[in-house]
Image (tube, grey):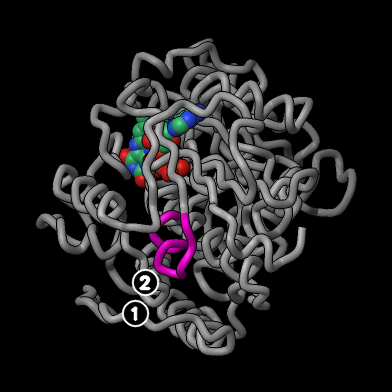
Amino acid sequence: MSQTEYSTKTIHIVGAGLAGTECALKLADLGHNVILYEMRPQVSTPAHRTSHCAELVCSNSLGSLLEPTAPAQLKWEMEKLGSQVLKCAIDARVPAGQALSVDREIFSRSLTKLVDENPRIKRVSKVIESLDEIGRPAVIATGPLTHPSLSKCLQEHFGGDFLYFFDAIAPIIDTDSINMDICFKKSRYDKGGADYINCPLDKEQYFEFVEEIKSAQVVVPKDFENTPYFESCLPIEVIVSRGPLTLAFGPCKPKGLRDPRTGRDPFAVVQLRQENKFGTAYNMVGFQTKMTYPEQKRVFKMIPGLENADFLKLGSIHRNLFINTPQLLTPKLSSKTDPLLFFAGQITGVEGYFESTTTGMLVALTIDSFLKDLKIQRPPQTSALGALLNAITESKENFQPTNINWGLFPPLPMTKKVDKKAAHTLRAREDFTRWHSDNSLKQHPFLDFCYFSQ
Ligand SMILES: Cc1cc2nc3c(=O)[nH]c(=O)nc-3n(C[C@H](O)[C@H](O)[C@H](O)COP(=O)(O)OP(=O)(O)OC[C@H]3O[C@@H](n4cnc5c(N)ncnc54)[C@H](O)[C@@H]3O)c2cc1C
C-alpha cells in the first residue's frame, strides 16, 4: 500500500487509558481519523472503576514537577509537544507539594470530554480479543491489565516467553554516590573483568541488616496480585523470611569475592551490577523487593558503602504485562513482524502514569510522520523522551520496566562538583529544543505553565 493510500486511513487504537487517550488526541490534532476501542464499561479490569478515558487506577499523582528532576523534565518536553493529558492534569491539579497530583474525577472526565467532542475520534465500547479484528495502522495501548484474550493473542503473535506478566525491579543507584573507599570492584573468582561493585558486610552488619529487612514495611499487594513468585526472582524479604542465613547463601553469597583491603572473604556481599552502558548507574543484584520506598532507602543505606546512596530508582514487584520491547519491537515501537502494529503505554516496558502517556505521544508522532511521509528523527538521547525511548528499545540481558530517571541519560562531561541534575536539565532542554525546531513540530499555546524551582 502506498503512502497516499495510508494518509486517508483510519488509525485504530485499542485502550483508552493514559497512552491511548494521548495518542488519539494527538493524532486527531494532527488531522487524522481515529477509532478508539475501549472495553470498559462492558468489561472492566480488577483495578478500574469507571468508564472514563485515562482513569488513574491507584494514586492520583503523576509524579514530580520539582526542578531539576527527570520527571519534571519529561513533563517540560511533553508540554512542548502539546500533551493534552498534561494540560488536563494541570487543570485538575490539587495541592500536593512538589507533585502533580490531580482530582482524578475531573482529570479523567475532562479527557473523556475532549475525546468525545473531537469530530475525528470515534470511541467504540468493545473488547478487542484478536489483532485480526482491527485494521492498520493500529496502536495497542491496553496496559498492564490487558484483557486475557488479547494477551493470549499477543503471546501467539510474539511467540515464546516474550510477554511478561510480572516485573521484578531491583533498586538502581547513581555510581558517584557509592563509597569506593569501602566497596571494591571484582567478579566472582576473578572470572571475567572486575565488573561488579561489591559492598562487604561483616557478621554483625549482616545480621543487623537482615533484622531490618524482616521488620521493614512492605507494600500490601492487591487481591489480583497475589500470585506465587518465581523462585529465581523472589523478593528480598521473602528470602530473609526463610531463615537468617538464606540471604548469605543466596544473593549475598561472599564466595570468590575476597576483599582486597582485608585479604579475607567478607561474611556477606551485596553485589552491584552496571545498569547502563555509560556506567553512571548500578543495580543491586537480586534485591527486587516489595518494601515501601522510604523503607528501602532507610534499610539499603545500612549496607556498607551505600550510606550516601542516591537511588535513581527504587525496587518493586507488580503484576504487569509488558513486551520484551528491545527484542520484539522496532525503535519506533512497532512489531518487527507487523510494522504498522504499534504499541504504547506500560505494555512497552515503561513504568508509571506519565511515562505511559509519553509513549502514546511518541507513537502518534511516528504514525503521523509515516502517513504524511515526513522524516522525523528520534528525540535526542540527552532529552527525557529520548532517554526513555532508548531505555526500552536498546537491547538488554534482563529487560525490566523503567520509569524516567537520570540514570537513563548519557553522562555529562564534567566533574562531581557541578550540580549534575541541573546540568542534565539544561542539556536536555537545549537538545530537545533543537530537535523540536529541526523537526518542525507544532508549537502549542499553553507553554510554560508554572513549575516549582528549588
Ligand atoms: C493496580 C495498579 C496500580 C498502579 N498504580 C500506579 C500508580 O499509583 N502510579 C503510577 O504512576 N502508575 C501506576 N500503575 C502503573 C501504570 O502506570 C498504569 O497502569 C497506567 O495506567 C498505564 O497506562 P496505559 O495507558 O499503558 O494503560 P491503562 O491506563 O491501564 O489503559 C489501558 C486501557 O485499555 C483497556 N483495555 C485493556 N484490554 C483491552 C482490550 N482487549 N480491548 C479494549 N480495551 C482494552 C483498559 O480497560 C484500559 O482502559 C499501576 C498499575 C496497576 C496495574
- Quarter of the figure with the N terminus: bottom right
Front one among 44 and 324:
44
| Ligand 1 closer than 8 Å to label 1 CB | no
Please state which amino acid type lies under the numbered disc 1.
Answer: His
| Residue in the image at 61% along x and 65% along y | 7
In the displayed structure, does residue 22 sit left or right of residue 411? left
Q: Could you say whether the residue bearing mark 2 is in a helix, strand or loop?
A: loop
Please state which amino acid type lies under the numbered disc 2.
Answer: Gly
Residue 240, percent from left and from top = 50, 19
Mark 1 Cα-neighbour bin, 10 Å: few <14, some 14–19, many ≥20: few
Residue 98, percent from left and from top = 21, 62
| Residue in the image at 30% along x and 62% along y | 86
Residue 48, percent from left and from top = 30, 28
Front one among 366 and 351:
366
- Quarter of the figure with the C terminus: bottom left
- Location of ligand 1 given as a quarter of the image: top left
Magenta stretch: includes residue 322: no
Locate residue 187: give its quadrant: top right
Which numbered circle lies on residue 444? Answer: 1
In the displayed structure, does residue 83 sit left or right of residue 279? left
| Residue in the image at 37% along x and 31% along y | 125
In terms of secondary structure, what is the magenta stretch mainly? helix
Q: Which residue lies furthest to the left in this view?
A: 95
Q: Can residue 159 be seen in this view?
A: yes
Residue ID for mark 2: 82
Seen in the picture, residue 439 relative to 75 is either above or below; the reply is below
Magenta-colored span: 24-33
Locate residue 377: give its quadrant: bottom right
| Residue in the image at 62% along x and 25% along y | 233
Locate residue 160: give its quadrant: top right
Q: Marks 2 and 1: in contact by CB < 8 Å?
A: yes
Magenta stretch: includes residue 30: yes
